[in-house]
Every structure is written in C-alpha cells, then in structure tokens.
Image (tube, coloured by chain):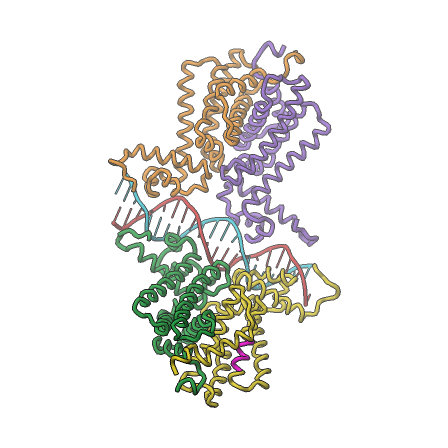
Chain colours: A purple, B orange, C green, D yellow, E red, F cyan
Amino acid sequence: MKAEGRQVPAAEKYQRILDAAVEVIAENGYFNSPVSAIAAKAGVADGTVYLYFKSKDEVLRTAIDTTFARFYGRVEEEFKTITGPKEQLEFIAQVHLESHENRSVAILMQTEMRQSAKFISEFSHHHLVKYISVVREVVRRGQKMGIFRSDVSDGVVAHCLFGAIDELLSSAVFTGRAYDAKATAAQVIDVLLNGIRSGEKHV
Amino acid sequence: MKAEGRQVPAAEKYQRILDAAVEVIAENGYFNSPVSAIAAKAGVADGTVYLYFKSKDEVLRTAIDTTFARFYGRVEEEFKTITGPKEQLEFIAQVHLESHENRSVAILMQTEMRQSAKFISEFSHHHLVKYISVVREVVRRGQKMGIFRSDVSDGVVAHCLFGAIDELLSSAVFTGRAYDAKATAAQVIDVLLNGIRSGEKHV
Amino acid sequence: MKAEGRQVPAAEKYQRILDAAVEVIAENGYFNSPVSAIAAKAGVADGTVYLYFKSKDEVLRTAIDTTFARFYGRVEEEFKTITGPKEQLEFIAQVHLESHENRSVAILMQTEMRQSAKFISEFSHHHLVKYISVVREVVRRGQKMGIFRSDVSDGVVAHCLFGAIDELLSSAVFTGRAYDAKATAAQVIDVLLNGIRSGEKHV
Amino acid sequence: MKAEGRQVPAAEKYQRILDAAVEVIAENGYFNSPVSAIAAKAGVADGTVYLYFKSKDEVLRTAIDTTFARFYGRVEEEFKTITGPKEQLEFIAQVHLESHENRSVAILMQTEMRQSAKFISEFSHHHLVKYISVVREVVRRGQKMGIFRSDVSDGVVAHCLFGAIDELLSSAVFTGRAYDAKATAAQVIDVLLNGIRSGEKHV
DNA sequence: TATGAATGAGCCTTCATTCAT
DNA sequence: GATGAATGAAGGCTCATTCAT
C-alpha cells in the first residue's frame, strides 16, 4: 500500500499491525484493546499504527473485510469447478468451518462483528447479507433443478445453514474443541438435506 | 429531582435501571453507553445505579441473566405438558423466536452477549451451553424413542437448531423484519426434521 | 450556572477555572496551555473543567466574552450620564486603558484574541467590529453636531482611536510600564482632536 | 519525488519553505500548521525543512524577521531622499499600509507575531520597539523644528500612529477590504497632524 | 543534500466510581 | 436511601523531530 521497495517492505509492517490487532482484539475485545497494546504486540510505536490505518476503527474493519474477501475468494474460485448445489453448499460449509484454524480470526468474527456499536453493526451486516445471498442462490438453483424441495423458503434455508455452521464454529472456538471441517460440513449438510426424522424417508 | 409522590419502591427502581440499561446498551453498545445515560433514562442519579449494582458490568450481566432465566422458566413450565420431542423442539424454537418482540432485549442478546473472548468464555457461553444441553437432551430422547435418526450426533443437531433459529432471529432484528414466531418455528423444525432434499428424486 | 446552594457554590469553581485559564493562557499562550495546567492552577481535577465548560475552546471564548461584556457594560452605563461626543470618546479610551490593571486579562486580549486559528479569529473579530461601531457612532454624532470635522471618514477615525489606545495598552502591558489611565486617555484624545501640528490652530 | 531537472539551488528551496510556511500559517495558525503541511506546500520532504531551519519555531521567526528587515530596508533607503518629518511619517504609514498587498504576510504579522506573552516579550516586541523608536525620532525632530507641538509626548504620538495604522491594516486584512495605501496614509497623517476637531468652532 | 518512515511524548476528552450532603 | 459534583486514570490521536538510506 504505502510500500516502497525498502529493506523491510512497509507492507510487512501493515500486515504485522493487522495480525497484532486481530490477536489483541480477539483476546480482549475491541474496546478493551488500546492502540498501544496493538502497537506493542506488532513491535511498532503507537504512532506508527496511524501511518497504516486512519483510525483504530479502520484496523478492525480492515481485518474483517480481509477475512471475508479471502472467504469469498475461495468460494468463487472453487465454484468454477464445483457446480452441483449440494456440493456447493458442502463446500461453503467446509470453508466456513475451516476458519476456526486461525483461532484469533475466528474469535474476532464471532464477537466483534456483532457489536451493536453502530459503525460495526451496519458495516458487518453488509457482509452477512452477502453471505446469505450466495447461499440463497445456490438453494434456488437446487430448487429449480428439482434437487431441493420447493415448498420451503430459500431465505429460511440459507439462514438455517449459515446459523447452524456458525454456531458449530463458534462453539468449537470458545470451548477449544477441534474438529474435522470437511467431515463436520458433511454432517451438517446431511442434516440439512435429509433431516433428522427417522424412517420412511431414508429407505 | 423527579420526586414523584412518595418514595418509589426500591424494587421498581432496580427494574427501571435494568430496563433503561437494556435500551441504552441496545442502542449504542455497552462501551458507548455511559452509566450517566442509563441513569438518565431510568430517571435516577448516576450514583443511584451503584446502590443497586456493583458495577456497570453487573448491570449488563444481570440483564442477560434475567432474560435467560425467563426463557428457561417458560421452557421448563411448558415441558410439563408438552412431552413429545418434536413438539418440545418446536416450542423452544418458538419461544426463542418470540424474543424478537422486545427489540431492545433481542439486540442486547444478539450483540453484547458476544463481547470479547474473555467475557464470552467466562460468562455468556455458560448460558449457551445450558441452552444447547437442553436441546441435546430432547434430541437424545427422540433418538431413543426412534423418532429421530440415531446416526447423527445430538450435539451437531442441537447446535444446528440453535444456530438456525438464532440466525433467523438475528437477521430479523437487524433488518427490522417482523415474522410470525410460531409459523417460522414450524418451518425451521420442518427443515430440521425432513431436510430439504426433494422427495421424488431421492427415494 | 450549574450552581446549587452548596457549601462551596459551584459558581465559585466556575470562576476559579476561568481565572486560572486566563492566567495560564496569558503566560504561555492558548496552545501551550494544557487543560491540566489550568485545572492545576484552579485547584481542581482535569475532568472538573469539563463540568463547567464544554471544551478548552469554550474556556477561552468565555474569558474573552466576559471581558467584553464587562467593557460594554461600563460604557453603556456611563453613556447615560456622559453625553458629549468628546467626553464619550475620552471615557471609552479610559476604560479601555484601565484594562491593563489586570495584567493577565490584558495580555489575553492582546494576544489570544488575534490568533489566526479560525475558531478564534472569526469569533473575536465580531467583538472588534462592535467596538469600532460604537466609536463610529460617537464620531458621527460629533460630526453632525459640528464638533468634529466632517471631511474625515468616521471609520478611519474610529480605527485610529481604537488602534492608538490598543497599542498604548499593549506596549504598557508588555514592557510592564504603568500609567495613569485617565491622564493617558486625555492625551490620546487631545492628539486625536487637535492633532500634533504646531501653531495656528491652537491660538 | 518531484525531482525537476537538475537539483534546485538550495537558496531557492529555503525561500520556498519560507513562503509555504507563511501561507500555511496565515491560513491555519501556527499551532494548526503541521510541518508536514508546510513541507508539502513547499514541495519538499518533511525532513528537508530541518536542513534549512533548526525548528518549526525558527521558520516562523525567520519569516517575521525577514518581513521587518524588508520594511526597515525600504524606510532607510527612502529616508535618504525624504527628509521632512511630516513626509517621513507619511512614508512610513504608506509602506506599513502597503504590506496588506501580500495577504498571507499581512495575516501572519497581525496574528502570529502576537503569540503568547513569552513569544512577544522575548522576540516580537523587539521589532515593535524598533518601529516605535524610528517614529519617535521623526516626531522629536519635528518637535525640535517647531513643526509639531512639543507639549505632547513623542512616545504617545508614536504609539498612536503605529496603532492607528496597524489597526486600519488589520481591519482591512480580516474583512478583505482593499484600499489605496497612499491615500489612506495621507488621511491618517491628516488626522494625526490636524486632529478631528472642527476648525470653525474652536479657533 | 534529500527523503519520508518511524518514533513517542503529550494533549484533549470521557466516564466509571466515590462520597459528602 | 438518593444525589450529582468531583475525581483522575486511561485512551485515541497528532505531530515535531530524527535518522537510515
């Protein structure tokens, strides 16, 4: 960004600050994370943070934006080769669940994104909306193809899927439990597709 | 200041502070809600808040505790008459979804409960764990009774249900959408029980 | 203002802060006067300043406003009994020159009122304009009465008078010289009225 | 960065920084003018400023010194040919009033020169003292020659003249009014020499 | 010389909490 | 119990100055 081809590229410092912010905020929450703590963890002076970010807010926003960008990047990329609705849902679930691998990032997404502080809630809701709309589209395609029931709202289904995965992720993150993202994704999709009612339907 | 008639009973002041806190915090977030604002909305002096609560934190904690207590109260009460696993799940979903009726409380639960990692893991998560465990029990009973499939983890199912409902609620709260709690609960349970896979094609 | 009839009336603290501010700012300039220094000199905590003033800016503005209000108060009062244009100019000059009696206030008026910092310059210019307009009116009356020459601009005369007095005051303040306000005022008015050209005119 | 042709001669850069400082400071005030803003307007790097000036303070001091030097240069030069006291006063007034032609410089002189008491007493006042002493000398010569009244203090007269002109200048600068320096100077000197008392009535 | 990234001291302001009344 | 004035610690942010290149 402000990077010149110096010995230590500025971009590296930018990333260091971002990483430090994620860690510190994940640990203490946004409002309990002084810029000084972030700077210290990043190994830079307090003022340096402001060479790379306009404000403390912007650091948080950037961290969240980046995470979502990465998420959507992976999804878009893979959707070129995975085209079946069921497989696509499975892939989304899997990538979503994989985000627990970086615990700090995962915590950040589970907590700070849901602040009610206006600036955050309005901005992060926007990301959620996009996520949901991606899932809805997949669901609708599945309905048109006759793979999914058409008598349930695609919106409800999308929220159910997102909520289910997110809750699993959240729970795992906060209890420290580990899991196999792919396998868990498969379970969730199994429940979503087939339901938990025993008997007739699964002969 | 606003000395109305005789002295207001203490208990009422306690509740007024709590209600004011919920509203103010829902609007601005915990860290952007000065005690003075809460006191003002409650119609008491700043110092009075400290006669009823040890700290600002405690006000928030109490609000959340109270909400959960009410929730579990309703559930326990009803479970005396509703005994079918499916019906119980439906009832939990419905009560959970009904909490959007008090918008401030709903916002509070969707946001401030998800504070920093520390706050969550040390306090809020405890409530979620209880919620999940209640659902798990119902699921297990259903599995033993042969109503629910036994080849899916009750934990996964519980998280799926909680997450799905919570996400629907959350989305409705932030978009301001209204819905029929009972009908929506039925839909969610339908999806959960029967899945979205189209019957004809996959018999 | 926010004063209650307490033991130490709040109004007293308000004044103490204002006085301390005037002294500290006169000594070091507005931008070299931390609020902490003002608070310390007033014998209150830093935060207390903000119970009485919205901002550091407001302290300065209030000090200047108050000084001018006092000035205009005295002038208006006296103009009820002093009605001759010459005598009125002499009185204005005298009151203006007397302001050196409180050295800190005088310094403040000579320095901070002329900041180019936007917020100050726009606000203080307003005071100057009023001063000038008062003098102009007196001059115009004198001209209509035939006491003053009508072939010189009242505006120029007013600025000359204000500037002359202000400069004398300023010089005295910064060199620490003392003077007799009434006598000096008389001299200035003498020069203004009669000029310094020797001879014919003063037979 | 903006490496234009060969290296720019150092002296030119020095002047560019000085000019930029005057403009920026005139616009925002000394304390609201970051060195970075001055450097930017001068088209040099922040650090470069410190190759030409020891500190930000020195830039301001130098700008003021330079302006006064230019002023005294013109006065001294012209005093070789203009020798009549009245004409000399008129010339000083005129040159002083002409300084409004460069608005930024004029603002700087009207505002930043009147910084804190310290700044004034230790630096700026020195310039004013010299100005006043030049005028006093002229007045004294006029008194000795019998052109000016001897019963008024030369100091008072000098301050009156300086103050009057300075106030006219100041007012014009801040209201954005333009005027003819020579004609205005003549008016001021007319008032100073002849006074405003109406001739007919007071012979 | 020139650069501009980096530093870190310092300041305005907020606000949870206390306590004299 | 109730009040609200007072406190003072803490934090976000700015910016003069330095220094490695």
- Write the residue at 70% across / 32% down: A77
- Write the residue at 47% across / 37% down: B119
Is E1 left, or right, of C173 in this rendering? right
- Write the residue at 47% across / 16% down: B88
Q: Position of residue D120 (x, y in %)?
A: 47, 71
Q: Is residue D89 magenta?
A: yes
Res. A146 image quadrant: top right
- In the image, is residue C171 above or below residue D33? below
Between residues B190 and D70, which one lies in front from this camera angle?
D70
- Magenta residues (range): D88-95
Q: Position of residue A75 (x, y in %)?
A: 67, 31
Residue B108 at least partly seen? yes
Between residues D91 and C136, which one lies in front from this camera angle?
C136
Between residues C84 and B77, which one lies in front from this camera angle?
C84
- In the image, is residue D47 above or below residue A144? below
The C terminus of chain A lies in quadrant: top right
Q: Position of residue C102 (x, y in %)?
A: 36, 69
Extreme bottom residue here? D145
Res. C55 image quadrant: bottom left
Residue C100 at least partly seen? no
- In the image, is residue B82 above or below residue F21? above
Q: Is residue D127 magenta?
A: no
Total marks placed = 0
Q: Position of residue B138 (x, y in %)?
A: 49, 17
Extreme right residue here? D5
Between residues A92 and D58, which one lies in front from this camera angle?
D58
Magenta residues, dominant SS class: helix
- Write the residue at 31% across / 70% down: C82
Is A86 left, or right, of B62 in this rendering? right
